[in-house]
Image (spheres, rainbow, N blue to C red):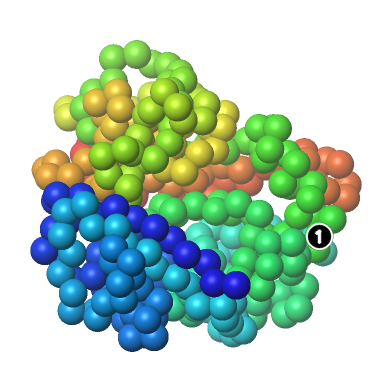
Amino acid sequence: MKQEIKFEVMEKDAGERIDKFVANCIDSLTRSYIQKMIAQENCFVNGKAVKASYRVKAEDEVAFSLSENVEPDIAAENIPLDILYEDGDILIVNKPKHMVVHPAPGHVSGTLVNAALYHCKSSLSGINGVMRPGIVHRIDKDTSGSLIICKNDKAHNSIAAQLKDHSVTRIYHAIVYGVLKEDEMTIDAPLGRDPRDRLKIAVVQTGKRAVTHIRVLKRFAKFTYVACRLETGRTHQIRVHMAHIGHPILGDTVYAPGRKSPVKCDGQALHAKVIGFIHPTSGEYLEFDAPLPDEFRHFLEVLA
C-alpha cells in the first residue's frame, strides 16, 4: 500500500515547480527521486496527475505518494566514526555537523546508519526497521554531538523507555544572539507544527509540552554561550525555544533568517555535548561528553 502525503500550497510558494515544492515539504527526499515519482504519476494536484514542470498555485491541493518499495537495502559504508564509547549493547558516537542520522527514500547513503552498519556489521537493533537500524533517537543534520546507537533490541527498548520518561541526561551547548540577563532560566512552552509554515516548528498552544532548562556559560558583547538541558525532546526544541524568547541560535537559517554573524556559519552553532543514561545490562549510570567541534571553538575564540 502506498503512503500518500498531502499539502496545501500557500501564497508564498505560488509559482514554484511542483518537484521543488515537494522537495521543500519533504526534505528527506532527493529532487531526482521526487521527479521519478512524478513521472510514474504518483503526484496529483487537485486530483489530477501533473508533470514535474507544473507550477503550483495558491490553495492547490497536492497529494504525493511514496512508492511501495520505500525501504531499499541500506549499504554499509566505510565512513569514519568518532566513537566515545562502545560495548556489546551500545555505541556512543560524536556525530559531525552535516551528517544525516538515517537514510530516507531517495537519500540512502552517507548517513550515520550507513557508517554504523559497516562498523557494527549485523549487530544493530531492528525495532525501527531497515531504514533506521540501531537508531533510538536522532539529532538534526546540522547539529553535531553525542548520539546513542543500540546494538540489540534489549538495549533499544531500555534506552527508548528512558527517553520516554525523560530520565536521559541531554545537555546541548549553543551560541545565541543577544545577551541573556538571567544566569539560569526555564522555558516551558508547547511545540507543534507552525500553522503558517509547514516546514517549521513553533510554540503553539495545541502542541506537546516542551521544557528546556538554560544556564549561561559566558556572555559576549552581542552573543551568549549557553548550556541547554532538555527535559523533553521535541523536534527542533532548543532552536525554537531560543528563537521564541528572542535569542535564536547563531547560524540558524530557519529560525534566525537574515541575522548577521561575525563569523561564517554553515549551520547552527548547536552541539549535543553531554548524554547520560542507565546502561541496559549493567544498570550503571553512564555519562559521556562530546568535545566541541573545531568550528564551534573557533566561534567562541572570535567572539572573545
Q: Left of 132 or right of it: where is 263?
A: left
Q: Residue at x 56, y 32 (%)?
A: 232
Q: Which residue is drawn at 14% across and 51% down?
A: 12
- Taking 203 as reference, is 15 above or below it? below
| Residue 112 place in picture, x, y as percent | 54, 68
Instruction: Pick the residue in front: 299 or 194.
Output: 194
Q: Is residue 253 visible?
A: yes
* Residue type, label 1: Asp
Q: Residue at x 31, y 76 (%)?
A: 49
Q: Left of 274 or right of it: where is 278?
A: right
Locate the C terminus by quadrant: top left
| Residue 9 place in picture, x, y as percent | 23, 54
Q: How crowded is mark 1: few (under 14 residues within 10 Å), some or many (20 or more)?
A: some
Q: Is residue 97 visible?
A: no
Residue that carries the numbered disc 1 in the rendered image: 153
| Residue 82 place in picture, x, y as percent | 55, 65
Residue 60, quarter of picture: bottom left
Number of residue marks: 1
Q: Which residue is drawn at 14% across and 41% down?
A: 259
- Taking 215 as reference, is 130 above or below it? below
Locate the N terminus by quadrant: bottom right
Q: Left of 207 or right of it: where is 58?
A: left
Instruction: Pick the residue in front: 232 or 149.
Output: 232
Q: Determine the residue located farthest toward the right in the rendered image.
A: 282
Q: Left of 105 or right of it: where is 226?
A: left
Regarding mark 1 in the picture, which secondary structure is present there? helix
| Residue 144 place in picture, x, y as percent | 44, 54
